Image: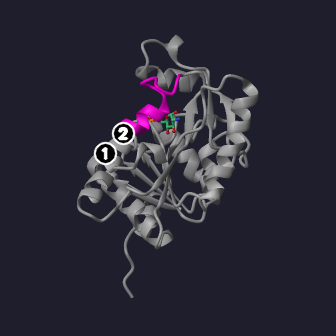
Amino acid sequence: MKVLIGSTHEEVAELAANSVLEGLERYVSNRPPVIGLATGSSPLGLYGKLAELVKAGRLDFSQATGFALDEYVGLPQSHEQSYRQTLIRDFCQVTGLPEANLNVPLGDAESLEVLEAAASQYDEAIRAVGGVDVQILGIGSNGHIGFNEPGTSLRSRTHMTRLTARTRADNARFFGSLDEVPTHSVTQGLGTVLDAKRLVLVATGQAKADAIAAAIEGPLAAACPASVLQLHQDVTLVIDEEAAMHLKHREYYDAAAQVLSL
Ligand code: GLP
């Protein structure tokens, strides 16, 4: 695992964008990229930096395919807080990824059977394009990634899940009231996330400090779903000083981040 600590949100966004760019350069050649997208406030600065790289001609998402991590169950796709609309606003419109190439798990199906069938087809759709090259992630204050709440199988595939009270409360700021926050979602599973070639997780603020410490230095355990990242061979966590405040091996991460010249 690489742990990069930025002193400002600007630096966090910059370090994360470099990691995404380098990942796409490493894993993609002679074909359009496949990018995994997260919602939430954490990746917004990163998306802004990626938009700058597009403007500078260093990245091109015009033929790219995007796969969202998750979607609420029960919100119409046109709802402004659906993750489809959120990613259209926060990613497609700033980077030029065509809306038609944005895949989002189906959350507004007419029945449970249709929803579950679509969830398992989501994993197949990812496989069919050769997998996600770089998956961008945030982290919930309880250690969830996507909407894989504590207790989720570490090898889970895309599935429907119930949201914890804490997650619903954390996300209530996007809705008129807590009652309006959906109770369920469809999320890529932890096994699905691990299949991406590179993972780049962004987290800032004190509210994420416990989750970050548990993810990086805690035991590999379903109690902290993000601890599953410890099993990935190419994962970078980009965090700020506040999110880093409970890390015990800070000195090592700082030293390891120095570029070695031979
Ligand atoms: C939601 C999303 C996650 C995201 C998390 C943190 O629960 N499903 O993918 O990582 O929120 O969001 P924020 O970055 O706004 O703190």
Q: Are marks 2 and 1 in contact (CB under 8 Å)?
A: yes
- Could you tell me the amino acid type at mark 1? Val
In this view, the residue in front, 32 or 203, is 32
The span picked out in magenta is: 76-89
Q: Secondary structure at mark 2?
A: helix
On the image, the x and y values in percent for residue 23 come to: 45, 65
Give the residue pinned by disc 2.
90
The answer to whether residue 140 is above or below residue 166 is: below
Give the residue drawn at x 46%, y 20%: 172
On the image, the x and y values in percent for residue 216 come to: 55, 52
The answer to whether residue 147 is above or below residue 65 is: above
Give the residue drawn at x 30%, y 65%: 58
- The answer to if 11 sits in the magenta stretch is no
Give the residue pinned by disc 1.
94
In this view, the residue in front, 97 or 254, is 97
In the orientation shown, which residue stands out farthest toward the right? 113
| The C terminus sits in image quarter | bottom left
Q: Is mark 2 within 8 Å of ligand 1?
A: no
In the orientation shown, which residue stands out farthest toward the left? 56
Residue 137 can be seen in this image: no
On the image, the x and y values in percent for residue 44 come to: 35, 42
**What kind of colouring is applied to the model shown?**
one colour
Q: Secondary structure at mark 1?
A: helix
Query: In screen coordinates, is 67 left or right of 21?
Result: right
In this view, the residue in front, 255 or 98, is 98
Residue 5 can be seen in this image: yes
Give the residue drawn at x 61%, y 33%: 106
Cα–Cα span, label 2 and label 1 = 7 Å
